[in-house]
Every structure is written in C-alpha cells, then in structure tokens.
Image (cartoon, rainbow, N blue to C red):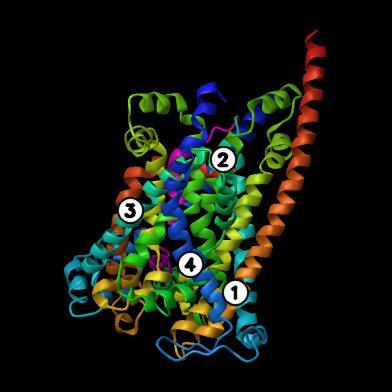
Amino acid sequence: MAVRKQKGGEIAFTVFQYVVCIFIAVICLMPFIIMLINATRSSNSIMASAISFVPGKDLMTNYSVFEGKSFNPWTGFLNSVIISVGATACTIYFSTLTAYAIVAYDWKARKAFFMLIMCVLMIPSQVTAIGFFQFMYKIDLVNSFIPMILPSIAAPSVVFFMRQYMQPSLSMDIVQSARIDGAGEFRIFNQIVLPLMKPAMATQAIFAFVASWNALFLPSILLIDREKWTMPIMVSQLAGDMYKTEYGAVYLGLVMTVLPLFVVYFVLSKYIIAGVALGGVKE
Amino acid sequence: MSNSQRHLKGLSYAKYGYMFALPFIIIFLIFSLYPTLYTMFIGFTDMKGVGNETHLLEQPFENFKSILNNQSFIQSLKNTVKIWVMNFVPQMGLALLLTAWFTSRTSKLKGKGFFKVVFYMPNIITAATIAILFNTLFGYPKGPVNQLLMSWGLTNTATDFFTSKSASQNIVAFIQFWTWFGNTMIMMISGVLGISPDIYEAADIDGANDVQTFFRITLPNLKTIMLYTLITSMIGGLNMFEIPLLFNNGGPDGATTTASVFIYKQAFKGKQLFAKAAAASMILFVIICILSAILFWIMRDKDAIAAEKLRKEERKRRKQQQIGEV
C-alpha cells in the first residue's frame, strides 16, 4: 500500500513538472509564434483579432508598406553581416593569439598583463560611449564600420576563455618539435595552434557573432547615414509613428530582422547551449 | 612543467610573447582605455554636442554635483535597481528550481534537451526586436495581451499598459527575466555537473533524499556560480538600454528610464549635454566598479571557507565510510 501511494505521488509530481515546463515553453515561444503568424495577416484582421493560429495571405501587402520608408531590411542585413563577420573574425583570431602569448611564452609583463585582462573583463563599454563617440568624430570615423569592427581585437572575456581552454590542451612538445623542423613562431601559431583551438573558437565565434549582430547602442550613435544602418537600428525604426497602425508590417519587419538568428539558433543550438554551459564552469 | 617546457620558456622566446600580445594592447589602449579617460575628461568640461568649442570648467566638479542633484538621474538609478531586482529574484528562483529538476537523478522528466533549447532561445534574439515585439503585444487597445485578458474575463476593458508606471516597470522587468532565466539555468546546471559525484554518492549512502541533497550539497556548491551570475547580471542590469528605450521610450514620466537610457538621452537627444552625460557615465562607472569589487571580495572569502568546510566534511564521511566497510 505504502509503496503504491509513493508511486502515485511520484507520478503526480512528474506530471506537475511537465505542466510547469510546458507552460514556460509556451511563454517562451508564444510571442514568436504570434509574430510569425501576424506577419502574414493584414492589419485589419489583426485589429479584429490579434491572436490567430492560421496564417493569412497578406505577406506581400505588408511588405509593400516598407517601400520608400526608412526601414530597409536588405541594407540592414548586408551592413550587419559585414560588421558581424569582421568583428567575429577579429575577436576570434586575435583573442587566440593573445591567449597563446600568455600561455606559451614567459615574458616579464605576462602576469601583469593577465591581471589587466581580468580587471577589464567587467568594464562595460556603454559607460565610456561619450568619449568613444567624440574620439571617433575627431578622427572622422562616424558613419564608418571600423569603430564597430577594429575594437573587437581586444576582447578580454574571450582571451580569458581561450586561455582557460588552451592551458591544459596545448602540448609544448609539439611546438618544440615544430621549432626543430625550422618553423617560425608565427607559422607555428597559424598552422599548429589554431587548428587545435577549433572547438573553442567555434563556440566563441557564435557568441561574438550574436553579440555583434544584436548591438544597438554604439551603432545607433555612430551610424547616422541611413545607408549604413545595421539590423537593430532598422528594427528601432519600427517603433516610429509611421507604423502605428500598420501592425502587419511591424510584425513582418520584426520577423525579417530575426530570421537569420532563428536559422543560426536551430542549426547550432546544441553547440550554443554547450557554450553557455562552458561559461558556467569557467571560474 | 616538463624539462623541454622550461627550456622553451627561456628568454630567447620572450619577445614573441610581447609581439603576439601587441595587437590586443594597442587596440585596448586606443579604443578602450583612451575613450574611458576621455569620457572622464569630458566630465570636467562644458562640452555640448560635436564641433562646438569646449572649455574646462572653473569649478571642476560642477557637472558631477549637478548630476548628483539631478532628480531625473537619481530617479533613473532607482528605476534601474528596482527593475533589476524585480527581474533577478524570480529569475534566480526559477533557474534554481529548473536546475533541481533537470539534474535530479530520480526525476522521470524527459525532453530536457528540448526544454533547454526553448528556454534559452529568447536570450539569443536581438533585444531591440524583443522590445518592439512586446510593445506590439501589449498594444492598446487591441493588442494580443489585451484581447487575451478580455476574452478570459480577467478584465472588462482594455488596459493601457504604457500610461501606467508600475505596469511599464513590471513589463520591462518581465522581459529581462524572460530573456535571461534560460541562460542562468544552463549556467547553474553546468555548475551542478561540475560538482564531484563522490559527494553525491556519499549523500546517497547517508540516505539523503532529493530535497536534502539539493539544499545541503548542490546549493552550497553553486555559491560561486550564483555570485558570478549575480555580478554579471548586475552589471548587465545597470547597462539595461534597448528594452526600456524601445518598449516605452523610458516612460511614462521616466518610470522606465534606466541609467543608460538617461545618459543616452542627455547626450544624443535634445540639447546634447555631452559633459553632463559623461559625468553621469563616470558615476555609473564608479558604482559598477565598487559593486563588483565588493562582490568579488565576498565571493573569494566565503568560498575558501566553504571549500575548506566541505573538504573536512568529506574527509569525515570517507573515514566513517571506511570504518563502515571494515
């Protein structure tokens, strides 16, 4: 009797867990489902009933609203790709190089340098934006992609991660035998160390890319020219008054800005989750 | 360290260390350190916008004093803290509950991988998009949320969430919670997986149940990760920008104006008060530095003590185990 009772309680508890998890999953997915479906519905039918699970036929009508307005997803997409790819490449390559400098060589300022990286790990870039903007204005880099790409070379948190990953996995014996074969230090890094670091580079690349793709603060103050706007700046235009009654178009615009992210996420979600988990054990 | 390694790390290769770290150092000095110092300097001037003549102030701390006496700035700090706390407490609570369920060895819950993927998803989507999406969802009078509330009979008339201070603050806090709980959960789960299985085995032998194991072993061992999450979340919270700006433009009546939104509006909207915004930035900067220093200090101390305690307990348990086995 007692055993059966316990079993009943266990089943009830498992059911309860499912109910809670499914409820949370619905809350996580619902906004995106409403967004996707309403992107295909006309503004009038959305006004009549905002929630529907049947797609409409007004996708193109909604799209035509963007003509001649400041919201241009294709320009935004192209600009965001250029910036994000450039920034990600800089972050990954130079962070690995910097980590290699810390792990493989014994130089005098090494400890001090690593301490510096630990200290600036936490400094948010937003609080120094005024000086950054003024500086970029003075050297004429407003409306240029350089201020969004070049600073990615110095990414303290990625260097920290790469160092943690490299320390146990890099064998100095391999490096040494390459030296005996007459390879230069730079070549050793590019041809031996970089391939070893591929898994770490892949996870960090995803996060660097997403962070760069999603950034709004700096791009929105530095990119004034409409032709230079990135995707998040385009999105922020949808909050404007001219779309106040064009519900379908707003939903469609939102969909267009996140579609690449959805694709990336569903293809790479396993690696992304593993990457977040690695962040959790990095101390 | 092996012999060859010691030899390799000899002086002859030291210059490569400097060489390979050089790009980082140069870029850091130019794009990070200099703008920080420059922001600080601007805080002591009367700079407005770009291209205007700028002078050092006769009373150097004038901007700082006026910002500290600025009711809107103080309000924005209060809003930031309030919204952050409202999001962080439930976020940590839910993350811990789900961690306990997902790592429990007696749980029959299936599909954990699917739930993890779904729970983490909001975190990867552009914050600007999420802010405007929620702005549309909470639309007045015909937004989806209003229609739901009315069709369920929870309200009779449509609610204008954007003119209510507390509703706007709650929604912004909810969005933050919604985007971050999955991330916190995955961090916690990986923290649990990092705890030595020996400790759990010992607990099993002692006849501890799931609840006891969670509170006596899992939770104390997660302290470091929890504090790490607290620090990063706090700093992220103080920089909260896109969601409050784009959800309701910092309103109504400044209720969702966070410190970052305040600085942005001072500098890049209206009168372009660069100097005032720079002073506010530096105050925020100092607050962030102090908070993280305090937390680091607490974390280090307690952690060492806790680790020592655990080690002792484990040793005791092992001894008892050995005696038992004999």
Residue at position x 57%, y 70% in the image: B170
Q: Is residue A16 left or right of residue B128?
A: right
Both marks 3 and 2 on one chain: yes
Q: Quadrant of the C terminus of chain A?
A: top right
Q: Residue at coordinates 38% horizontally, 28% vertically from top-left?
A: A179
How far apart marks 2 and 4 lie (CA) works out to 44 Å
| SS for callout 1 | helix
Mark sitting on residue B152: 4
Across and down, in percent, residue B163 comes to: 52, 83
Q: Contact, CB < 8 Å: mark 2 with mark 1?
A: no
Whether labels 3 and 4 share one chain: no
As drawn, A213 above or below A19: below
- Name the amino acid type tagged 4: Trp
Question: On what subunit does the disc labeled 2 rest?
Answer: A
Q: Nearer the viewer, residue A113 or A31?
A: A113
Using the image, determine if residue B233 lies above or below residue B60.
above
Q: Secondary structure at mark 4?
A: loop
The residue indicated by pointer 2 is A281
Q: Nearer the viewer, mark 4 or mark 1?
A: 1
Q: Is residue B225 above or below residue A187?
A: below
Report the mark closest to the observer, 2 or 4.
2
Query: Tag 3: residue type?
Result: Phe
Q: Which mark is residue A262?
A: 3
Name the residue furthest top.
B326
* Label 3 with label 4: CB-CB less than 8 Å: no
